[in-house]
Structures are given as C-alpha cells and as structure tokens.
Amino acid sequence: MAPRGRAELPPPQPPPPPPQQVWLWPGKMLAMGALAGFWVLSLLTYGYLSWGQGLEDEEEGSLRVQAGERPEPSTTATSQPHLIFILADDQGFRDVGYHGSEIKTPTLDKLAAEGVKLENYYVQPICTPSRSQFITGKYQIHTGLQHSIIRPTQPNCLPLDNATLPQKLKEVGYSTHMVGKWHLGFYKKECMPTKRGFDTFFGSLLGSGDYYTHYKCDSPGMCGYDLYENDHAAWDYDNGLYSTQMYTQRVQQILASHNPAKPIFLYIAYQAVHSPLQAPGRYFEHYRSIININRRRYAAMLSCLDEAINNVTLALKAYGFYNNSIIIYSSDNGGQPMAGGSNWPLRGSKGTYWEGGIRAVGFVHSPLLKNKGTVCKELVHITDWYPTLISLAEGQIDEDIQLDGYDIWETISEGLRSPRVDILHNIDPIYTKAKNGSLAAGYGIWNTAIQSAIRVQHWKLLTGNPGYSDWVPPQSFSNLGPNRWHNERITLSTGKSIWLFNITADPYERVDLSSRYPGIVKKLLRRLSQFNKTAVPVRYPPKDPRSNPRLNGGVWGPWYKEENKKKKASKSKAEKKKKKSKTKKKRPKARSSPNCYSGIIPG
C-alpha cells in the first residue's frame, strides 16, 4: 500500500476539554425481569433473536433467547477474525443514546461502551460516496464519483477496475456476504454485488424504497420492484416484511449455515433510518411524547434498528462467531432534520460538508480489542476500513495501488496515534458554483467558486457552496415549531466563498478564522490543488430511458446488454466490409490514389 502524501501544519494552541455527556438506559434491569415470563421459543426456518424490548410480534415468528443460553465454543480453527461491518443509513450524530439522544439505543450504547467509540470519525455527506470509499479505500476523486449519487436511471456504477474489499478478502479465504442496500450502480451485470466480490447478496440496489413493499419510484412512470437475491429479483420475499427485520433474519440464516472455523465477512447495510419514515407499530410505544411526527417515526425506526443489531450480536454468540469477531458500526452520513434526524450540536446536515453532514456515529466492538471501554479521538475516515480489514484478514495490498485509507487498527485497539493527518472531504467541479467565488479570492491558488472541503490536522477549509448551514437544536422537534430555532439560522455573508475553522477547538464551526489566518488558508488551498491534480474525470452520465423497470419485467435491474452491443458492432462491421467490397468493384481505379478513400464513409 502506498498512501498518498500528507500536509504538515503547525498545531494551534490546545483547546479546553469538551464537556462529556452521559446518558443511561435504565429500562434494561426492570424490563428484563418483567418480560422474562413472556419469552417463548418458536422455531421457524431460521430464528429471530431478540432482547425482548417489546411484546412478541407474531408476524415475525420470532425466536427469542437470552444471551448466554447457548454455550460459545472456546476455540476456533481460524486465526483470521470474522469481520462484521454494519452501516446505518442517515443516522444523525446526536441520534444515539451515548450522544445524549432522547431515542433509546441500549444495544448501541452497550456495544460502544464495551468497545471503542470513534469520536473523530468522518464519512461522506451522502450515500454513494461513503459506500464507494468504504469498499475501495479511495477518495471519490479517484473513482470518478465526485458528484452526487448514482441515480437508478444512470448507466453508471463503481468503476470495474477497482479491486473491492470483498474481492481482496476472498483472496485469503473469506466467505463474503452482503445484506442490505448496495447503491453503487447496477446498469450492467458486471456492476452487481455478486460480480464485485460477494458470494451472496440479499437486498436493494437503489438508494431508498418502501420498507414493506420494496418498491421505488424514481419519477412518475419510473417505478419498479427493488429486492434482490443474488442476481435475480426476490419475488418470493414480496410478502410485506419490514426490511430491517427481514435483513436481520437473513443475517441469522447466513450465520446458522456457516462454519465458524472458517472466516466470514458480513457487510450489513441497513436501509434504516433513511426515508420514507416507516416502522412497525410497536416501536412507537416509547415515543408518544414526541410531538413532531417525523421525529417520532424516526425514533421508532431507530429503536427497531437497535433491536436488530442486538439480534445480530446474539446470533454471533449463539452460532460460535463472537469470540473471534470484530464488529464495526458506522452511519453513512449525517442526519436529515427534515426527515427526523438530529446532528446537534454540529452544524449542517446530510448533503453538506459542514460537520453535521460528515461527522458520524461510529464504534468498534470486539473481544480482540486490547483497550476496551475507551474513546478514540484520533482522526479516522471511512476509507481507512479497507486497508485495516485487509490487514486484519492477513491479506495483501499491492504496493502500486494508491490508496487514500490507512491501517488504523493499532490506533483503535491500542490507543496509538493515527497515521492519518488529513482528509479530503471532496472536490466537486460540477456542483453549483458559488456566485462570488473566484481564483482571486483563492489567492491565485484555487478557484473558490468550486465546492470543496479539506481537513488537515486541526484545520478545516471549505470553499464554494458547502450546503445548508443551520444548527438545528432539539427544540426544533418540539411543539414550539420552527420559529424556536430560527435564531440559530445564519445567512452566508455576501461575497463569501471560503471558510476556515479550528475543528479541535471549535467543533461546532461557530467562528470563521479565514480572515485571521490567511497563511493557513493558503497552505490548505495548495493542498486542495495538489489533490485536484490526481483527480480522474467525473462519471455522471445522463439518464438512459432503457432503465425503466417497465421494460425489464417491472424490476429495477441491469438493462445494458453488452452482448447485444457486440452483436450490433459485429453486424455493422460485416455490413461495412460488404459495402467496401462493392465500392471496390465499382471503382477499382480508386486504389491508385492514396487520397481517394480519405473522405469516404462506407455504409
């Protein structure tokens, strides 16, 4: 592995330590005793394990067991750890119990408290970029996915010349399985998850859809079914089961059928808590006091997700994987306040390069950690999982592959300093330009009309249009309505196209220091310019009408037929050759002049 260069800047004065928030979920001790008598065993094809956070749901046909009922094998045959990566969708920075949320997340709180909390952890502000960087270890400027997301109607996908994480893990004997949301393109079969390194895939191809029907409309008249089993539509599962529970059951089935003596990689990309805001009725019970309907629905969805993750953890224990497993939990981007999410006290939201869009909930839980029950404040980015997991799996990364991620296992497990000192959040040359940005505003180094953001040590620089920049406090979700938080709103100064913050001292981005430290601004602009020289062209093609599910059996799926293109090309070449032959017979003298064919286009 050859990580790209880094910039060194003098550190500012150390900031005062931030206040720590402690939130406890007291219901476990009382609820466990009260509900113990109601737990029953009902064996289905594959069970559904639960902590008993609510009454039994007969529609699920749940298998409810307590942790520890089934003994764990004391040893395993593999030295390679089982790797479990759980990716939540649109979970806000505040939306976990240990960050002070009113939403109850006892599973996440417990796993994080017993593991390592990542409190300086960054992802991308929207779905596709985070997923692409996780699976390749590369910034999006190095895969051509700098702009927006991959739309379902676009002939676009994660470039095929990138070796993916599951492909590298398969090289060293891992069984690789993906359950959940793909969102890395599917316009041709080569783009599908099973062609990118996964032995099995069960989930959705698009960015969102109905949690029960698994249908998605991208626009009027462009609607289709979006649930796949490997490379085919999973019509057998069109039975109205809520996706969070359905995906969890599939994970349990995979674990039940796999030999724990052989290493497994499980990528569980839940649809929750992305819109549409849907959840089974029983999860609303604890949140009747939340008046804002979007927040209440979001809270119910997150509670269901929390229970699902507990069920996954119990399955790891029940089937003999846990003692040799590494569980990584991450959100893919910040929350969307209009859809119930909260990033308070961070600024901004999903889709922006303010901290609220890119600073994520994340932790690592594993019996293999050397320092458990700790907090990691070292700089960590989603690209770091690629080299870290390959290293843990005893795999190899070719020296000529230029990765943007770093192996940060010792940073997490032992508390060592992170090898990472900078993060390129992105450079998007297509995004709407800042009206008042210019090369002159960027000291002749960088055109500040371009949307970009970079972090180097304590400093963060933004240029162009960073996106929605409000701070949205918890009161915005109360019956006080939006007027309560309008005091927090700001209007970007006229002519403003560049911002500088000391994120360590000012994580909430309240004090712009760009005019106070022009020297630091110039250094970061130069670093942006250096990154930009390594960027590949943006891949963002126009929509293809052949993508319409109506033309593909009512299903979203691959529509680009490579074989048809080749047949047409072969036929075209044959026709051209035939017409050339006829032309030669009609005008044989033309051969005497080397210029006679220069302007002829046969056929």
Image (tube, grey):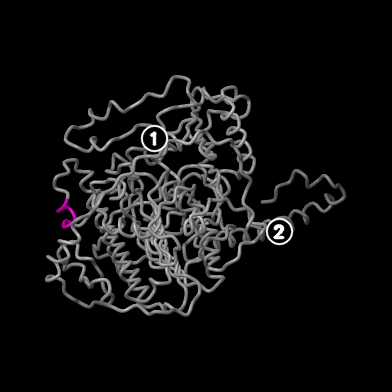
Q: Is 398 positioned to the left or the right of 413 in the image?
A: right
Label number found at residue 577: 2
State which region is magenta: 281-286
431 vs 249, nearest the viewer: 249
State the image quarter where residue 159 is shown: bottom right
Query: Is residue 283 covered in magenta?
Result: yes
Q: Is residue 393 magenta?
A: no
Question: Label 2 sits on what residue type?
Answer: Lys
- Give how far apart the Cα atoms at labels 2 and 1 are: 67 Å
What is the chief secondary structure element of the magenta stretch?
helix
* Depicted 347 relative to depicted 196: above or below: above
In the rendered structure, which amino acid carries the disc numbered 1? Tyr
Whether residue 556 is visible, yes or no, is: no
> 8 above or below 325?
above
Which mark is nearer the camera, 2 or 1?
1
* Location of residue 374 in the rendering, given as x and y in whole percent from the top left corner: 40, 55
Q: Nearer the viewer, residue 174 or 474?
A: 474
Residue 520 in sight in this render = yes
Q: Looking at the picture, how far across and down is residue 263, in whole percent?
A: 47, 73
Near-viewer residue (304 or 148): 304
Residue 365: x %, y % from top left = 39, 61
Occupied quadrant, residue 339: top left
Please tell me which residue is depicted at 63% across the width and 29% down the height of the picture. Answer: 445
Q: Residue furthest right?
A: 592
The residue identified by callout 1 is 508
- Secondary structure beneath dot 2 equals helix
Residue located 15% across and 69% down the image: 36
